[in-house]
Image: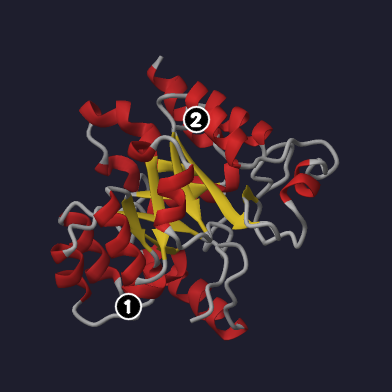
Amino acid sequence: MTLFSKQHRPYKTTIFFLFTLSGLMIFSCKSKNSGDHIKDGDKNNYPNYFIAHAGGTIDGIKYTNSLEALDLSYSKGCKLFELDLVLTTDGKIIAQHDPPGITEEEFMAQPIAGKYTPMNMDSINCWFQNHPDAILVTDKINDPQKIYDEFLFRDRVIMELFSWDAIDKANELGIKPMVSENLIFGTSEIEQILDDKKIEYICMSRYYHISGNEDLLRRLKKKGIKNYVFHLELPLPIPEPSAEQYVWDYEMDFCYGMYANDLGLLDSLLNEQR
């Protein structure tokens, strides 16, 4: 199966139309502040609901997977950081959306967007060592053994994985797996499988919230499975200050948290507590 990226998994125009139409219908039945599912006593957990997508947006630029993006997202209170991990031509792990087709040395010598610091496994380990409350969430790489061997903080990593074999290997190694959408919606008896494998995390596109899966997603959430959604940039039924705000206000019945590009909402929620 081809593994499409979170940013570029293709959907046909008709699907976007149905998404928008369905969203309008569902929105008409919803009241704002779906975020009320969070009890007052749980508000210290706000950072748990946000994953900085590819490190988070910096200077309006998404998906840099850069050192500066991690620093900025951390300064806004983020604790979970997704990085797209791919291999260079000499087999080294680096943080970039697509394999660069060059060596690690060549990659590290090229600033991202001309000004941001690229990251390899050495710099990733260094950053997480300096931020002991941060958790790495991986994308792209489907090899738990390689992360086990090279990431120094095995108790602080969640791996999005795309095959049951990889998920079983992660469980064997003591790495927390996050089951990708291609397995959730491509497997019969999925609820029983998730129970049997003691899965805590799943992730999927927002598209699936309004595609006839609402009951399944509510059941999974009731069981304590944490579903993080991406594709926040898909068409929204109404204008909002941000896609993150829309998901927070209207779609938290179907998910636990989100892959956020903009961590401004988290920053605002935390500031309200102070």
Instruction: Of the two numbered discs 2 and 1 on the same chain, state the one appearing first in sequence.
Output: 2
Q: Where is residue 64 in the image (x, y as percent from the top left)?
A: 69, 46
Label disc, if present, on residue 212 of the rendered structure: 1
Where is residue 164 drawn, in percent x and y? Answer: 31, 71
**Can residue 216 be seen in this snapshot?**
yes
Q: Residue at x 54, y 51 (%)?
A: 243
Between disc 2 and disc 1, the foreground one is 2
Label 2: few (<14), some (14–19) or many (≥20) C-alpha neighbours in 10 Å: some
Marks 2 and 1, how far apart in space?
A: 39 Å
**Left or right relative to 89: residue 153:** left
| Residue depicted at x 57% and y 36% | 124
Name the image quarter holding residue 223. Answer: bottom left
User: Mark 1 packing: few (<14 Cα in 10 Å), some, or many (20+)?
Assistant: few
Disc ID at residue 128:
2
- Amino acid type indicated by mark 1: Gly
Evaluate if marks 2 and 1 touch, with contact meaning CB atoms under 8 Å apart. no
Query: Which label sits on residue 152?
Result: none
Q: Is residue 131 above or below residue 249?
A: above
Q: Quadrant of residue 169?
A: bottom left
* Residue 255 appears in view: no
The residue nearer to you, when weighing 89 against 38, is 89
Q: Locate residue 178 relative to residue 121 in the image: left or right.
A: left
